[in-house]
Image: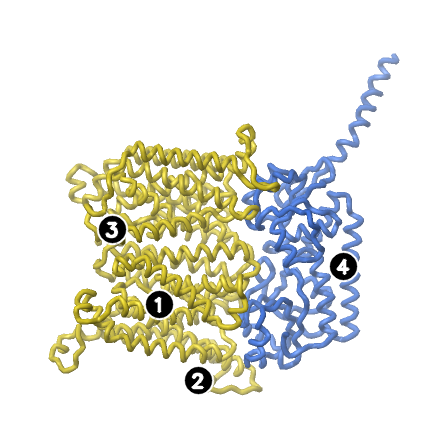
Amino acid sequence: MSINLRAPLTTALLLLCLMPATSLARSWSHEAGTLVLEQPPERIVALNWAAAESLLLLGITPVGVADLPGYSTWVREPEMPDHVANVGTRVAPSLETIAELKPDLIVTSAEMAPAAELLQRIAPTYVISVYKDGTRPFEKAREMLRTLADMTGRSEQADAILADIDTTLEHQRHRLRQAELARKPIALVSFLDDRHVRIYTSNSLFQTALDQLGLANAWPGEGNYWGFSAISLDAIADTPESRLVVIEPLAPGLPATLSQSPFWTYLPPVRNREVYQIPPAWPFGGILPVKRLAVALTDALIGGGQTSVH
Amino acid sequence: MSTEPARPLSLFRPRTPVRLPVTIAMLWLTALVMAVFPWLDQFQLPQLVSVFWSFEASHYDSVLAHFSWAPRVAIAILIGGALGLAGAVTQQVLGNPLASPTTLGVEAGGQFGITLATVFTPGILALSPDLAAVSGGLLAIGLVIALTWRLGFSPVTVILSGLVVTFFLGAINMAFLLLKGEWLGNLFIWGAGSLVQNSWAPFFELLPRVLVIGALMLALMRPLQLLQLGAVSASALGARVALLRAAALFLVVLMSSVVVSRVGVVAFTGLAAPVLARLLGARTLPERLLWSTLAGSGLLLLADTLAHWATSYSGGSLVPTGTTTALVGGPVILLALQGFRNTHHLPGQATSPGGFLPRRGDTRLVASVLAALLLLIIIVAMGWSPGLEGWRWTPVSQWADAWLWRGPRLLAAIVAGMALGLAGTLIQRMTGNPMASPELLGISGGAALVMVMLTLTGIETGRAGQLAAATAGAAAALGLLLLLARKHRFAGNQLLLGGVALYVFMDAGLRLVMASGGSTAAQLLNWMYGSTWLISEPEALGLLALVTGLAVTLLLALRPLTLLPLGDSAASALGLSVSRARLCLLIMAAVLTAAATLVIGPLSFVGLIAPHLARVLGQQTVGRQLIVAALAGGVLLSLADYLARVLVYPNQLPAGLLAALAGGLYFIWGLSRHGRN
């Protein structure tokens, strides 16, 4: 009898011992299938800068990042610690280097789809495309942050970061409404040369900042999947009632060339003293540039417009 | 063709055909109507004409028309004329209907200069945009002249070197764009050519320069005319032929660089305009200069207006003028395929066969040396690599692991090199022309064009689908070339011209993608120059099986290959079913080219070099040339792939780009060697 009782007991005990192990192996579905992780990943490789930014925001230092020198030049914030390995360019990373790092998670986008099989051989690969046709970059970046937090057990941190961004945006919106500056639409541009600009469109990351601030985008159309259109300067003139916001950096000599150009001086925003120059924010990043842009934009709008760039 | 006015001889001068002025006038009229049309709802016609010199500050449309539209129209006419004139002068100087600033590498050189300046010394660009472009242009044409000096600027050799220099400098440009893309964002637009204006300043800066250079060109007209008599008689008449040519070409470089540094690369206008003038019947030099200038203006205005329209149609997103000049220029060049008589020969054909055949080499010895070299490269590529801790040797016991990252790409590169070696030999034998190659004839270009279109339309196909599509493209290009050139027996300009035209179309697609910017451009460029890193093991093995199968078939089909160059009647008299044999070989060449193009991109030059190398090494019969060319191709591309992986570690260069660089150097070396003989 006693023997009969012991057998189910042992089984139950065995099951109890196994339970924690099996419950730790969790799975997430993503753009290229399902991803199973036995335990929270610690050695993560980011193949684009939006992913690198999200990891750093969560307090995780990736072991490898694609185009590391470029990150420090263009994205800057959050700062990248010193001992991270560079795994090559963002369009053609070195697979062997990634393998050498022995990662337990690789974060990449659908652009790397041709290499998906090879990446999968190295480590579980989380595919999420912040920039892709028909997506809202901010939503996707938020989803990426949340999922990465979930995988690494840092959901509280993610919630705090997102709440902070929401509060900041709400605060800026309030400031703008107080100053009664939210009415005229905004043309958000980066200069390519003295005749061409990149204008950020309704499917851009920065559109979220404009939406949250209660500002309208002056440019009517959608751009490429990165959320911009390369346009000639005269195309801005089509919306004469808009304000022109120029994102730094500007090429050396450009302000001088522009100030000598009669076309520029007759441009409605220039004539109306409604040119605003704001410090750099990386337009193809994750969630953080939205906060950065929103604050800089609000400061600039409240600070008052100018008649040119400098 | 003297133009002495007093002589009654002038009575016999051919009259200018009526179609010449009529067609050019139609061209201008179409272009002007199209340019004016979008403004007609804001302005009356006389008002619109007056915006060229005045505007109303209170009326923004008027400001826009005065500072944006009017200078754009004016600069299109000015630049088009300048390039048309430069093109006509170039063609006169070199006695060559294919010469132009584009085909001589001057525009690529200008772009190269600006790229270097942007990366290393941005200050110079702010100081004077001309300086960098002129230096680059001079470098390019200097290379071409240095290469062809000994050959007395033999026409087709000049064009071939020009094309190679264009590809060569273009490849270096691309390397910069790929590695420093973010820094060069504006260069994507500049490289694509944009005539957008926002003041009259560039026009008035350009106008005196163009007028002075143009006047100097016209001053050289009389001595240039002597060149029409041929170099020998001209020098007998006392003209210093070489000096004269150098002076005229220097002016061409100045003209193109001055234009290029302000609006970017507006390719093919300088080629299409003189070609059009000649096609329409402009015979004497003054006629050609005049009508080519006018045709250039008309063509560029039309192309730019099309670009403007396309920009509005795409909701403001910029369509660069470089795209539409290529689309307008391409058909003109294709038209020229029919129009030209076969008066020039490619190098190699011009030489007597006896002079061109090097010493016979022992096939077994040559093949084993090449095979040993290939083995050595395989060992080094598998074992000696940089890693996170620096360079180190991977012991053979660990090669099974290393194979995953180093093996498939190496294997694919070798196989692609072999395929190109075979395809190149095949095409040279079929056309009986030792300078023909998949790259220069646009067969790789045809495959690439299909791939670019697939990318643009966003259709996802697997490797098999890509291979099928690329094969169709290559076969279409090759079939078209054979069809067009059949009556000329595959000789002379037609083939090259066809290749150039295909290259133009491919270029147009690329420019469009480049201007839209972002990673799509970088990815497409990566592929164009051969991204071996993506190849998986099954793909590499599949490719190996395919190429091995084709190689075996080819070696079994040596007889038709030996007989075909003898001519159709001789071949069929010897019992060969000519058309069927030709079709089979055509398909095989197309499949081989397509398979290689998928791996290494369209611009590697291996299809030109490998067969040439085989001949230099003394392999004259078809079978031997095939074997040695395949081995040489394998050696070249495996080395390129290895260097692409390790040179700028952890970044990678596309292997095809390195092959193009090495190929360009080899070609340059080979040409100068021929010159010495």
Judged left or right of residue B285, residue B11 is left
* Dot 1 or dot 2, earlier in sequence: 2
Q: Count how many numbered circles sit on residues in the image.
A: 4
Residue position marked by numbered label 3 in the rendering: B677
Q: Position of residue B44 (x, y in %)?
A: 46, 85
Q: How would you rate the neighbour count of disc 1 (Cα within 10 Å): few for under 14, some for 14-19, many for 20 or more?
A: many
Number of residues whose C-alpha sits closer than 10 Å to that of mark 2, classed few (under 14), some (14–19) or many (20 or more): some
In this view, A118 is above or below A275 = above
Q: CA distance from mark 1 to mark 3?
A: 34 Å
Q: Amino acid at mark 1?
A: Gly
Residue A300, quarter of the rendered image: bottom right
Residue at position x 56%, y 60% from top? B183
Q: How many angstroms separate mark 1 from mark 2 (CA)?
A: 28 Å
User: Residue tagged by mark 1?
Assistant: B270
Residue B492 in the image: state x and y as whole percent: 25, 55
Q: Which amino acid does the dot numbered 3 rest on?
A: Asn
Alpha carbon distance from label 3 to label 4: 74 Å
The residue where tag 2 is placed is B49
